[in-house]
Image (cartoon, helix red, strand yellow):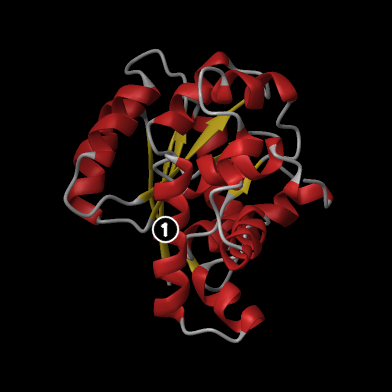
């Protein structure tokens, strides 16, 4: 079972997400709480995935994210937002969020996205705008130059990573061992000077790799 904690200041959102995810046979929402309760519940329940509202009145979602990422064994955290151009999104990605979802995500896709997160995959709303991507990459090494530091195999793995595949999925696709894929992913993150799969995926998008461009 994939254990999920939903954190949102709106009871309606919490309840809706819980009903949708609990209907999936392999996902259990262990709690649906407000931001004030989030850190204590993560410590008590040890969820695999946290869906975290990026902006809440009682406590800032980015503050919670920072504290969760500092844990010895942090859960996978994806941010929830109602704004695809939210100025907080770029900050969340820099801090190590595994992606972000709009609160109006199609219910049919939500369970799939949680499974992807649990498998260390990348989840980004299809409504991610160029404003968000550009804002995140501003001031960094140009993406096209960054990917030139990668070997052909690393670029191949980067594309699959950016498409949301987990290490296991990539290994199966390329007939490699999971350990070998993990080593390649670590090398990719180091060469691109990023600290997470989502950040690497954004570099791949900006460099045109996902459109077959160079």
Could you say where residue 212 lies in the image, as x and y percent from the top left? 83, 52
Q: Camera-side residue: 15 or 67? A: 67
Q: Residues within 10 Å of mark 1 (few under 14, many from 20)?
A: some
Q: On the picture, is 30 further left or further right than 16?
A: left
Q: Camera-side residue: 67 or 149? A: 149
Could you say where residue 125 lies in the image, as x and y percent from the top left? 68, 39
SS under mark 1? helix
Question: Which quadrant of the figure contains the N terminus?
Answer: bottom left
What residue is drawn where x is 51% and y is 56%? 117
Q: Residue 65's quadrant in the figure?
A: top left
The residue identified by callout 1 is 187
Q: Camera-side residue: 185 or 1? A: 185
Q: Residue 187's quadrant in the figure?
A: bottom left
Could you say where residue 118 lies in the image, as x and y percent from the top left? 46, 62
Q: In the rendered image of this protein, does residue 66 appear above or below residue 49?
A: above
Q: On the picture, is 136 further left or further right than 130?
A: left
Q: In the rendered image of this protein, does residue 98 appear above or below residue 177?
A: above
Question: Can you see residue 162?
Answer: yes
Question: Can you see residue 22?
Answer: no
Q: Camera-side residue: 89 or 41? A: 89
What residue is drawn where x is 30% and y is 23%? 63
* Residue reaching furthest to the right: 212
Could you say where residue 123 lies in the image, as x and y percent from the top left? 60, 48
Q: On the picture, is 212 further left or further right than 4?
A: right
Q: How many marks?
A: 1
What residue is drawn where x is 75% and y is 40%? 126
């Amino acid at each position: 079972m994939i254990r999920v904690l939903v954190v949102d200041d709106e009871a309606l959102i919490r309840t809706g997400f819980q009903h949708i995810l609990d209907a999936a046979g392999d996902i259990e929402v262990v709690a649906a709480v407000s931001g004030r309760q989030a850190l204590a519940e993560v410590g008590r329940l040890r969820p695999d995935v946290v869906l975290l509202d990026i902006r809440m009145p009682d406590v800032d979602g980015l503050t919670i994210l920072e504290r969760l990422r500092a844990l010895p064994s942090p859960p996978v955290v994806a941010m929830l937002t109602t704004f695809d151009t939210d100025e907080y999104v770029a900050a969340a990605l820099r801090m190590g969020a595994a992606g972000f979802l709009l609160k109006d995500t199609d219910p049919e896709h939500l369970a799939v996205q949680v499974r992807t997160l649990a498998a260390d995959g990348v989840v980004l709303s299809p409504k991610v705008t160029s404003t968000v991507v550009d804002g995140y990459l501003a001031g960094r090494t140009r993406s096209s130059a960054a990917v030139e530091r990668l070997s052909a195999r690393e670029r191949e793995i980067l594309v699959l990573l950016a498409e949301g595949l987990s290490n296991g999925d990539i290994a199966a696709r390329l007939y490699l061992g999971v350990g070998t894929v993990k080593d390649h992913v670590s090398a990719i993150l180091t060469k691109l000077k990023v600290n997470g799969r989502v950040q690497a995926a954004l570099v791949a998008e900006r460099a045109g790799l996902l459109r077959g461009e160079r």
